[in-house]
Amino acid sequence: MILFNFLKNSLFLAVFTAIISLSFQVHAKTSTEEQRLEQFFKDLEAFTVVFSDIKQLYVDDVDNKELFNNAIKGMVSGLDPHSVYLEPKEQKSLMESASGKFGGLGIVISKKDEGIQVISPIDDTPAYKAGIQAGDLIVKIGKKPVRGMSLEDGVDLMRGEPGTDVQITILRKNQKPFVVNITREIITIVTVKGYLLEEDIGYVRVSSFQGPTANLLKETINKLVKENGGFLKSLILDLRNNPGGVLNGAVDVSNLFIDEAGLVVYTEGRIPSSKLKFKTERGDILLDSPMVVLINKGSASASEIVAGALQDHKRAIIMGSTSFGKGSVQTIIELDGGYGLKITTARYYTPNGRSIQAKGIVPDIELKNISLENEKEESIVEIKETDLTGHLEQETPDNMTADEIVDSQEKIQASLDKKAIEKLKKDYFVHEATNLLKALTVLGK
């Protein structure tokens, strides 16, 4: 029986090798290509030997499909942290994430060595409220260590039914590992918030980039203009802990502020379809008023595109700390049987040709992690209705008219905005940006 299995597997591998051989020989024309082909077969031989050894010697019988799936996963994940071979369940999960609404904790993560690193928490999500910070290393999910765990397996463990709890063990710089208990919620991303910090100075936070983000940003600025009783003389655009999102969203946001011909971003890869240029569309909604963009180590991908474009076009002053450095483009390829392949196909470059990948955007003015009231750099405004004295409970009194209910809600929102603005003014990054904008306005810059 062992001999039969050995012959069967040997025959299978021989056929597999022959098919690959014919495929490569058709294209091998030069001596260099022939040398590469020869090396390829040496590598393939090593693969087939290991495959055969597993089939014959491993303690349990493993079918070919499982072995090949594992081999493909290893082959793809070895390329970079963002390339992944997706099984049907993982492919479905990815599509749920792309929809902007899903059940989970609300963090953007990536692989780092043998662990899972938090790129940034998403505003107003369970992870954000629990105090998870950009740069945190997740070492355990529940009772399962993440060492050797795939990113997708980690995501799968952290997702679940809304209302259920999950414990994650965090390793943070200069601290001992600690456990955080988080209750899962339906994650619905609100991408834009805006406040009038004081007369003529607007503040807008963009937490991620989706298709409608540019329109939401435009509406928010228009609302601030109306609240200000006139045009804004300066603006703070806060992209801290913004993990990115849809490329077109980043391009559209950049184009709201750039009023000159040129590029927002371009991509370069090996295949022609990966070489793309995204041009500016003239029309600055702020009419060249001074602008500061805040970034930090949690600003990644699409947020780095916006910061890089505004910096290269000299449209805004970038303040904060060097961004994450995620400057690569991933393409999703649908495969048979519900499988998928997310593979890196290009790199992003700023208009002046700077690569974002692994370098990030370096701010024009670097700010240290200084707190005005013993807060963390990553602490972005978090005001909930329950923070307010005398807040309304969930029930609505039967004797309140519709107008009274609306009036009550408007008062609550006004109180929320006031508290948010008070907290923003104690944010060191916002404080410094405000002072700079005041100086630029006085100088007429």
Image (cartoon, rainbow, N blue to C red):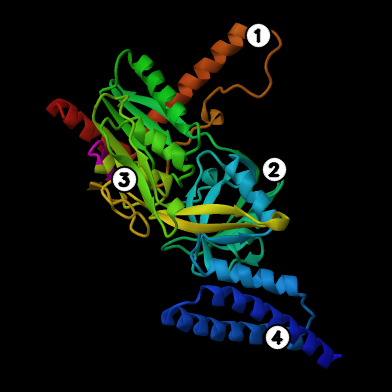
- Amino acid type, residue under disc 3 in the picture: Gly
Nearest the eye: 110 or 349: 349
Q: As displayed, is residue 46 above or below residue 159? A: below
Disc 3 target residue? 308
Is residue 316 located in the magenta-colored stretch of the structure?
yes
Q: Quadrant of the C terminus?
A: top left
Dot 1, how many residues are within 10 Å of its Cα: few (below 14), some (14-19), or many (20+)? Answer: few
Residue 400 is tagged as: 1
Q: Which residues are magenta?
A: 313-319
Give the mark nearest the N terminus, 4 or 1.
Answer: 4
User: Disc 4 and disc 3: Cα gap in Å?
Assistant: 51 Å
Q: Is residue 134 visible?
A: no
Residue 322: x, y in percent? 32, 52
At numbered mark 3, what does the secondary structure look like: helix, strand or loop? helix
Residue 113: x, y in percent? 49, 69
Give the mark nearest the N terminus, 4 or 3.
Answer: 4
Q: Is residue 10 visible?
A: yes
Residue 266: x, y in percent? 36, 47
Disc 4 target residue? 52
Dot 3, how many residues are within 10 Å of its Cα: few (below 14), some (14-19), or many (20+)? Answer: many
User: Disc 4 and disc 1: Cα gap in Å?
Assistant: 76 Å
- Amino acid type, residue under disc 1 in the picture: Met
Q: As displayed, is residue 394 above or below residue 62? A: above
Name the front one of labels 4 and 1.
Answer: 4
User: Disc 1 and disc 3: Cα gap in Å?
Assistant: 51 Å
At numbered mark 1, what does the secondary structure look like: helix, strand or loop? loop
9 to the left or right of 191: right
User: Disc 4 and disc 2: Cα gap in Å?
Assistant: 45 Å
Q: Residue furthest bottom?
A: 3
